[in-house]
Image (spheres, coloured by chain):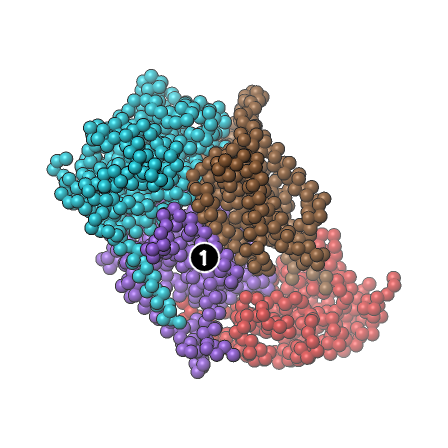
Chain colours: A brown, B cyan, C purple, D red
Amino acid sequence: MSDVAARPAPNLLANPWIKAGLIVAGLIAAAMLGARLDGSGTLYKIFIDPFDQMAAAPDLLAQTIWEGLVSGVLYALIALGFVLIFKASGVFNFAQGIMVVFAALTLVGLHEKGVPAWLAVILTLGVMFLLAVAIERVVLRPLVNQPDIILFMATFGITYFLIGFGESVFGGSPKQMIADQLYLPKGAIDLKILGGLVSLQKIDIAAAIIASVMIAVLALFFQYTRIGRALRAVADSHKAALSVGISLNQIWVIVWFTAGIVALITGIMWGARSDVSFALEIVALKALPVLILGGFTSIPGAIIGGLIIGIGEKIGEFYWGPLIGGGIESWLAYFIALGFLLFRPQGLFGDKIIERI
Amino acid sequence: MKTSHLMRATALGALLAAASVPAHAQDSIYVSNNAYRTGPFSGSGTPIGDGMRDYFAMINERDGGIGGVKINFEECETGYDTKKSIECYEQAKSKNTVIYSPWSTGATLAAIPRAHIDKIPILSMAYGLSASADGNVFPWVFNPPLTYWDGALIMVRHMANELGGMDKLKGKKLGLIHLDAPFGKEPIPVLENLAKKYGFEVKLYPVAAADMQNQGSLWLSIRRDRPDYLYNQGWGAMNPTAVKEAIKNNFPIAKLVGVWWAGGDDDARAGGAEAKGYKSLSFHQAGANFPVIQDIVKHVVDKGKSLAPKEKVGENLYNRGVYNSMLVAEAIRNAQTISGKKVVTGEDVRRGLETLNITDARLKELGMEGFAAPVKVACGDHNGHHKAYVAEWDGTKWTKASDWMEPLKDEVRPLIEANAKDYAEKAGNWPKRTEACEKSS
Amino acid sequence: MFYREAGQFKSTYAADMAVFPIRQDRIGLAIILLIAFIGIPLIGNDFFITSVMIPFLVFSLAAIGLNILTGYTGLISLGTAAFMGVGAYACYKLTTAFPGVNIIVLILVSGLFSAAIGVLFGLPSLRIKGFYLAVATLAAQFFLQWAFVRVPWLFNYNASGAIEVPQRLLFGIPVTGASASPETRYFVCLCLVIVMTWFASNLVHGKIGRSWMAVRDMDIAAELMGIKLLNAKLLAFAVSSFYAGVAGAMMIFLWYGGGEAADVFNIRLSFNILFMVIIGGLGSLIGSFFGAAFIASLPTIMKFGLPALGVPMSGATAEHVTFMLVGALIIIFLIVEPHGLARLWQIGKQKLRTWPFPY
Amino acid sequence: MNAEPMNVSGSPLRDEGEVLLAVQNVSLRFGGVKAITDVSFDIRKGEVRAIIGPNGAGKTSMLNCINGFYQPQEGQISFKGQRRDRMKPHRAAAAGIARTFQNVALFKGMSTLDNIMTGRTLKMKRGFFWQALRHGPAMTEEIEHRRVVEDIIDFLQIEHIRKLPVGKLPYGLQKRVELGRALAMEPELLLLDEPMAGMNLEEKEDMCRFILDVNQQFGTTIALIEHDMGVVMDLSDRVVVLEYGRKIADGTPSEVKADQKVIDAYLGVAH
């Protein structure tokens, strides 16, 4: 019965609806821009001026790309947490953002209570482990085999609970990340290149390095350990994993714990850049376009998606944003992702969607 | 089955009716107060809430209330969410609050149209709708001691003072970092007017609410444009991030000036030692060395009745809460004097607010000598456009770094009147003011 | 014992196709309507009506809208709040441009604008599915929210940057603006919600609803039935956004009475409405009401109700406890009945049908 | 490899009835994989046409080409004498081609009744406005179609499951509902993809009866894929045999049964 085969994807532009939609969207965009610029020199400002600026001040371009790279790495870290969980348990974990806040708050909160910094890190890891066990016991196990959307909903319940719990334990006020105590570097390296100054924050460099190391460790973990192989087996097929005697429950605990570690590291890095507060939860939403770009199941996708989104939105905001009043960063990422998505509906690295009948 | 439904509805109704029965209507004055100790803005909301709460706790403890009547001060948690603020308003209304402090621009805007129907005075202290300073149009809304427009003016004055005169402003660049929301956009028209008048340039740097902690590209633009000064109309997590980014991007921190809401101790502290020199406008002093704060420490904090840790008492935003409660308390006291009643109503408090005149002498009596500039509210002018100063972060605390500066009332007042008129016209049969002005005060 | 269908025989297809084929259900509906129209205005005080009932109605309508898209057509959207915002701004523009036109008409017309925008952002649904589509709809959410702040034309260049709801009359009684009484606003909401629920019920029980569900359950087979996928999906986007738009206009005009709409129609609201739909029951209109009651009204009732019952809690603690309780309740409900409160309701009715002798 | 041994000009059924659907030199590839290579055959009005072949022979792909899921790279298909370029499934439906699936493709969340009612979608003309009112013309129309559907339900003897969601029905019944849904479209050509797969003997007999009844009572032309040779031989008027995407035989059941290539294909021959 294998004479079932992939259904070729429909040609996008052949569809009159899409065509019409694109034209309309284009016209609206053009009209909005035109109005904004009083109709003078619009095309110049869109297509020529930004590139002139790039050429005129290469140091700013380099700085923009660096900024994009760093935020890209941080987006990727959040996305990584999503991917790990989605890959192993098919759960779209809405709670990843709050897990970042919760982990960072626990760390800082413990330190405030007088626990030495490194001990606080270890204790926080313990808390994240307990959280993973609790989530597995209380939420995932009773909901096993439910549709994805139900599990998604359950993670919203977790979010609500963690917000209330975190605030009642640690209070809502923002806290300083204990960057010094964790020997995270401060200050900047100023490079006098490209006819100007490119300033690289040491904390950003550290973030990039730590993220890379963590990704490498995760890759090794997946590739060479028994648990890692089991995780991949689960990702491929729950039933197959069960049939080779892997306990799904253990796997879930491990995956959620891993996501918790990623959340803690993300929280430390973001926290060091601004501060640790519940507002961080909003930043976590930025991981969503990264996810659609990179695919929900691909770790390299999360990384590369993060970088594309990070650099794309910074360059877009910096060079094109002023044309329509700035602040376009809030939605640009989604449009970048959407653009990619129209051509690759499963994301850059996602598993191919094959329709069978 | 259906009967159970009916019962449930009835029970619900009864429950909520119970929730809103005026408590102790006879022997105390009910003051409802919004606060946000939860949510993304809780960092700023918590110290303010503590200050407000502790001042009334102190008044009740030390003086036995105001004019012998205890103040039943109740906080309503909003999480800085407009939906919850509206619920809080309805709750406050059903409990016959004598005053409503919305504590967010969104909540203020939603409450303004209702206030004159429900006869509840609104105190939006130096926030909310600038135009509501026009008492002839908004008899129930009060926003002393100054508006964001005054703030923008003082910012420009500060710039001129440092540069050596208004004429030195020519050719300078002032950047406005602002939350991309009505609150953040408030100073824009005034700054643009002044820019035209004095020949400087205004650059706008909007920060979307979702990107409060993600200001990378904005600061790159600042690096590119090289503004001479930056004015930060920000709130919540946006402020510490801005301070950190300024340091990161080598922007001279002394040239970064925040609106009074960007003057939290935590905002500055985020920048570490390098944040020394960060400035913010303010209309009251920080610090615990005022008799009023000492009284709070003595009667409330030391007795373990405060929610604030002792070291936070006297911080800038804590003192702002105290200041807000002081205005409320003085309005109630004034209302008692005018009406001759002990237990005043919302309408009395409105009159009390309208004739509020807190002189230096009165401030001294309150234990607030030098704490704040005198405040006077008038029938037509519900703001007063009072003095403010520039505070500077010295690395550990806020200090007063300039003289009290008078905003240019003549610049602002016409704008306020024009906008108030516009508001009333657009609202369609906005009620004419029927409340009489007090003869004397 | 009193909930039985025995003895009720249908002799026509029309009777069999009725939405409530069992007589007791119809009686129940009549009782609920009676309570809604008479009981609640009599018993409830202003606080109950403005902070519990009106929000409940508005969210129910929005949830019905999203349920049409997500529950019936199987397309997840996280842009509902933005589409509600389009409705609110459209209504504001319309009523300031045509002050003479009845506000109820304008509220409904503003839904059409929302529908048009919904169709535009629904176009990618042909290519993109599942959670990918959900995230793609976030583009609509963030872009529109940005536009609400950035296009001053939308709020008539008000200095406050907010929608300032003008007073509008219906039969000489103010329905919007500050002088509109809570009862009036409640009645208007109630009537709109009832009529629109009736329309939605008609749609989902007929040919169009079947096409939607066919697309949801098996899009390939649906195509074979002659259903054009893109048309069905876009129609779902249009109808869903229409409902969202009307709900948004109601929210600002009949509930908030003005305010910073860009801030109101934020991503949180989008998520909340999605959760109302899921917890209420995907593909169930009555579930939308349950979901709205659970997600929107429960926290309010807990926050204000518990202290009134003598559970001593400070504002912030109450908020924290509410958050934790609601979170825990969501998980508990999902474990007990993943198909939502509507299914629980059905099971309850089924039990009642055979009660007291289940065998 | 072609159909020459079956040289068509000798068959007794040859000239009866007009050609309803003609497949001419159709080839279909997925990337480098050839699913169908140069296949031609026709289906005549009123006949039961079987398509058989071992696994992977391209039978389902053939049906998918016929109702427009796949676009063959070469060759053409004409229905009722009209050639169709770029067939779409919904256009095939409008033209009068209905289909059931190898793995049941019912709308799982809907009741039996609603599933079959979807088959009437194309025949229902009332637009959005009337649908929203669900009174007057829309209701009349709905009742009218409900009648047709009830007839089909009676015919298939599935009255008892009318209001149950199909997702929970046993497999055999699901297959029956799916047939009902296809019948509700009142198709001219009905494509059945393994209608009896996974059924027990009794269910198979029922299904055979339904297929014959449909063919005889409604005069519907039927093309079916089936593995059970007994069923194929009993039901069909003519059989086309595919192997590895190519046609290896075409003719009456008895002709096909006797064909050496078919025997080899089914039993396997060492090449």
Q: Amino acid at mark 1?
A: Met
Residue drawn at x 58%, y 68% is: D167
As drawn, B354 above or below A8: above
For residue B62, what is the image quadrant? top left
Query: Quarter holding the C terminus of chain B?
Result: top left
Give the residue drawn at x 55%, y 78%: D160
Residue D259 seen anywhere in this rendered image of the structure: yes
Say which residue label 1 marks.
C276
Nearer to me, B350 or A330: B350
Residue name at image x 62 percent, y 60 percent: D87
Along the line of sight, the residue nearer the viewer: D35 or B350:
B350
Q: Is residue A64 above or below residue C168?
A: above
Question: x, y (%) of residue A89?
Answer: 61, 53
User: Where in the figure is residue C65, as x and y percent of width and height?
Assistant: 44, 58
Residue B128 showing in the rendered view: no
| Corner quadrant of residue A294 | top right
